[in-house]
Image: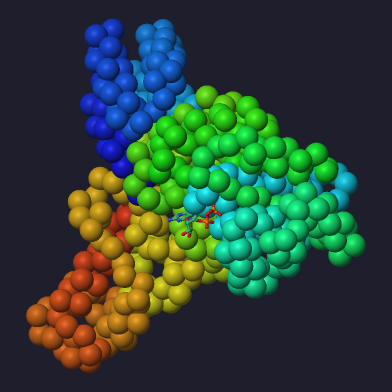
């Protein structure tokens, strides 16, 4: 998971400060030293670190007394607010043209994930924004890129406009826009050529494409794993052709997070989306506040809820929520929800979005191997009704019987019981959160 080191360090610092009823200037100084170190370790641009520390320190020293929070909690809130600001503050939404079609140009270096993201974005815009996208293969130098986009188009059942490798990218883009108008496709997403490095020829080609019809958005796709390089690339592209936003890919990897935390401040261009996997649905709108919460271990409940809303039947979701609250979740429910949960993405990723998930011992190892879902189902189906509702009664003998009945091993049964316990723990946490909402005192 991205931001792991940063998250761990910041959470350590925040935990120390959170409980303090009084904060001396020395406390603030010491904390800022730790925060500074955490940011530098995470490969955040030095200028950005400096201005961040300055802002937080100023606010922390001149702290107003708020009745509902301890000074320590207030500082945590300041760090969270400033972290949010650093990443752009408000979520930056996509700009659609008033006259059809909206044209989105995808630019970036080779390997950043441009072609993949072009497909993902089209999928998201169709699903969430009700758009009718046309994918345009304008990377004529790499035949594989055209094939790749065509494959993605087939996979998503979306039209792809391509003219092979002999045509000129500018003509392709122009004809594609005409084609979209004729076919009433309202969103044209152009996959342009990439290079290994920023070069003059590439920039000229992008400028030429841009001049056909001023695109409504020019998205730079950058690989978050490349850290400060990503920031430099963003700066170069912005200087040369003027980008309107950034898509940060590979945030599912173990990037230290420097790019995500520096790009906005350095380029003054917002991160619009983040790529979180190789699959076609692994693209999410970027929410600075949620990301800040996630980094500080406050969980990312809103993203989780949104994921659930997209993939889960609403009535079922309500039922599930009720069960979460009353802690009356059984193995039967587990089975029933398995399918829906599976659609939300990898289970271990979902667990990590829950508040405080980082602190639950052993959760980092609670990987759910999706290919073993069938096995899990078999185990649950081999339980008696009583075992499903009160798994505490499952002793060694029962385990043996269940393993035999499901054609699995006792270890498999043990593993599932442990995972179920972990899930229940998470639910308790969640219901705890919901309960606290109404109270005056904020607890972070
Ligand atoms: P392009 O050269 O910029 O068009 O890059 P591609 O779209 O071909 O992507 C390069 C590689 O990165 C492919 O293997 C993609 O599957 C992978 N990739 C793209 N986005 C993501 C992401 O968000 N997460 C992960 N893990 N891989 C990604």
Q: Is residue 116 left or right of residue 425?
A: right
Quadrant of res 382: bottom left
Please give the name of the residue rendered at 52% of the width and 24% of the height, measured from the top-left corner: 266
- In which quarter of the view is residue 210 placed? top right
Q: Is residue 85 visible?
A: no
Point 63% across, 27% down: residue: 239
Going by the image, does 4 lie left or right of 260?
left
Residue situated in front as seen by the camera: 196 or 390: 196
71 or 436, which lies in front? 71
Q: Is residue 310 left or right of residue 33?
A: right
Q: In the rendered image of this protein, does residue 435 appear above or below residue 141? A: above
Image coordinates for residue 245, horizontal then vertical, percent = 62, 37
Q: Residue at x 42, y 32 (%)?
A: 228
**Residue sitting nearer the eye, 293 or 18:** 293
Residue 57 point in image, percent of width and height: 38, 12
Instruction: Judge whether 302 appears above or below 183 on screen.
Output: above
Name the residue at the right extreme: 182
- The image quadrant where one finds the C terminus is top left
Q: Is residue 205 visible?
A: yes
Residue 395 point in image, percent of width and height: 12, 78
């Amino acid at each position: 998971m991205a931001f792991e080191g940063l998250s761990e360090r910041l959470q350590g610092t925040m935990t120390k400060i959170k409980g303090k009823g009084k904060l001396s200037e020395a406390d603030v100084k010491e904390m800022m030293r730790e925060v500074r170190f955490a940011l530098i370790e995470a490969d955040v641009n030095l200028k950005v670190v400096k201005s961040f520390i300055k802002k937080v320190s100023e606010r922390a020293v001149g702290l107003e007394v708020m009745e509902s929070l301890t000074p320590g909690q207030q500082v945590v809130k300041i760090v969270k607010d400033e972290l949010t600001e650093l990443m752009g503050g408000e979520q930056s939404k996509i700009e659609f043209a008033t006259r059809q079609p909206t044209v989105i140009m995808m630019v970036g270096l080779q390997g950043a994930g441009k072609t993949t993201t072009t497909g993902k974005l089209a999928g998201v815009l169709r699903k969430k924004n009700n758009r009718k996208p046309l994918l345009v293969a304008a990377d004529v130098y790499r035949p594989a890129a055209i094939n790749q986009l065509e494959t993605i188009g087939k996979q998503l059942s979306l039209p792809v406009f391509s003219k092979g490798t002999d045509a000129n990218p500018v003509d392709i883009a122009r004809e594609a826009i005409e084609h979209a108008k004729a076919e009433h496709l309202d969103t044209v997403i152009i996959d342009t050529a990439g290079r290994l490095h920023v070069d003059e020829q590439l920039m000229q080609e992008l400028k030429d494409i841009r001049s056909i019809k001023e695109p409504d958005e020019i998205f730079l796709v950058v690989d978050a794993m490349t850290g400060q390089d990503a920031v430099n690339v963003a700066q170069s592209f912005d200087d040369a052709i003027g980008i309107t936003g950034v898509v940060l890919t590979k945030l599912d990897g173990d990037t230290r997070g420097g790019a995500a935390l520096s790009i906005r401040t350095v380029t003054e261009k917002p991160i619009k989306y983040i790529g979180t996997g190789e699959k076609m649905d692994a693209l999410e709108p970027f929410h600075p506040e949620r990301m800040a919460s996630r980094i500080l271990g406050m969980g990312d409940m809103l993203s989780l809820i949104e994921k659930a809303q997209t993939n889960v039947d609403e009535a079922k979701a309500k039922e599930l929520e009720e069960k979460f609250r009353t802690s009356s979740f059984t193995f039967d429910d587990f089975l029933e929800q398995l399918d829906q949960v599976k659609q939300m993405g990898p289970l271990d990723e979902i667990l990590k979005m829950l508040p405080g998930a980082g602190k639950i011992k052993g959760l980092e190892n609670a990987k759910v191997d999706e290919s073993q879902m069938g096995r899990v189902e078999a185990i649950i189906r081999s339980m008696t009704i009583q075992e499903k509702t009160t798994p505490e009664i499952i002793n060694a003998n029962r385990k043996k019987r269940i393993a035999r009945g499901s054609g699995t091993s006792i270890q498999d049964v043990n593993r599932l019981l442990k995972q179920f316990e972990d899930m229940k723990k998470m639910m308790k946490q969640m219901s705890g959160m919901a309960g606290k909402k109404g109270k005056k005192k904020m607890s972070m």
